[in-house]
Amino acid sequence: MVIDEVKIIGDQCLMRWGLWARADGVVKRLGYPPCSPEQATSNDCVSAAQNLDEDALACHVDGVLSRMPNEYKLLAMHYYLYGLPLRKIARVTKCSRTEVSEKLDVLRGAVYGAIT
């Protein structure tokens, strides 16, 4: 039960970070190149980011990601920021889907540990 809570809360925080990072202007300030111009300025992303709790959670998640090894940062960007499926990430990184899922679990755990 605790493992499920870690996955769910960590995943929700990372999803909210992805929305925040895709918001207009934030992607450029952080140095994350937009996947496509449509995604970087979509109305859904901007409105979701405006509803984010004063950017505090997203900034905190961004701080956690900045302390992670590069492979985890790239995984977070590809999965939560750009919305790429796990299989595509696995194919590009030349590893199994299971390995990508395990790395996502490590990310979720790190975020969960930082916010609790």
Image (tube, rainbow, N blue to C red):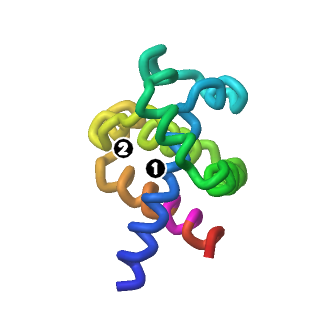
Give the magenta-colored segment's residue range: 107-111
Identify whether 35 is placed above or below 17: above
The extreme bottom residue here reads 1
Q: Secondary structure at mark 1?
A: helix
- Residue to which mark 1 is pinned: 15
Residue wearing tag 2? 95
Whole-Å distance between the Cαs marked 1 and 2?
A: 23 Å
Q: Position of residue 40 (x, y in %)?
A: 51, 23
Callout 2 secondary element: loop
Q: What residue is shown at x 51% (from left), y 45% (from top)?
A: 76
* Quadrant of the rendering where the N terminus is positioned: bottom left
Residue 29 percent across, percent down from the top left: 72, 28
Q: Is residue 65 visible?
A: no
Q: Nearer the viewer, residue 73 or 93?
A: 73
Give the amino acid type for the residue marked by disc 1 in the picture: Met
Q: Amino acid at mark 2?
A: Cys
Looking at the image, residue 28 sits to the left or right of residue 18; the answer is: right
Q: Is residue 108 depicted above or below 48 in this figure?
A: below
Depth check: 75 or 64 in front? 64
Q: Give above or below for 1 relative to 104.
A: below
Which residue is the extreme one toward the top?
37
Name the front one of labels 1 and 2.
1
Q: Give the main secondary structure of the magenta stretch.
A: helix
Q: Residues within 10 Å of mark 1 (few under 14, many from 20)?
A: some
Q: Work out which quarter of the rendered image holds the C terminus and state it.
A: bottom right
